[in-house]
Amino acid sequence: MTSTTGATGTTGTFCPYCGWPDDAEPFQVVSRHGTATGSTLWTRCGCGSLQVRAVGGRGTRIVSRSRPAGAAYSPAGR
């Protein structure tokens, strides 16, 4: 996997599917898009979960996350 570390920062959160810290490698940058307030990064965790990261002057935060491909939906797991 390829990854980028300079544009992220410390999120202090963990992937709920594999437990890996969101700001640690490995994660793959899928795409990067400039916005009026910074940028949006689409990344993929090592477990396969797709994440949308908002990057701005106050750091990075994950605004959306998918289940890894093939993971079953379980409303009881919420």
Image: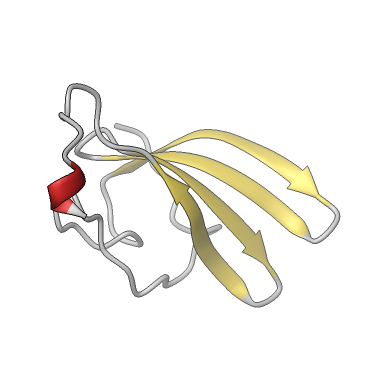
Vertical order, 19 against 68 (above or below): below
Picture quadrant where residue 69 is located: top left
**x and y percentages locating residue 36 in the rendered image:** 86, 55
Residue 46 image point, x, y percent: 23, 40
Q: Is residue 31 left or right of residue 57?
A: left
Observer-nearest residue: 20 or 2?
20
For the C terminus, the quadrant is bottom left
> Which of 54 and 74 lies nearest the eye of the viewer?
74
Total numbered circles: 0
The structure residue drawn at horizontal position 36% and vertical position 38%, both measured from the top left corner, is 66
Residue at the spot 44% in from the left edge and 40% down from the top edge: 43
Q: Quadrant of the N terminus?
A: top left
Q: Quadrant of residue 14?
A: bottom left
Give percent across and percent down for residue 61: 51, 64
Residue depicted at 35% across the width and 62% down the height: 23
Left or right of 7 on screen, residue 33: right
Reply above or below: 23 against 30.
below
Q: Position of residue 33 (x, y in %)?
A: 70, 39
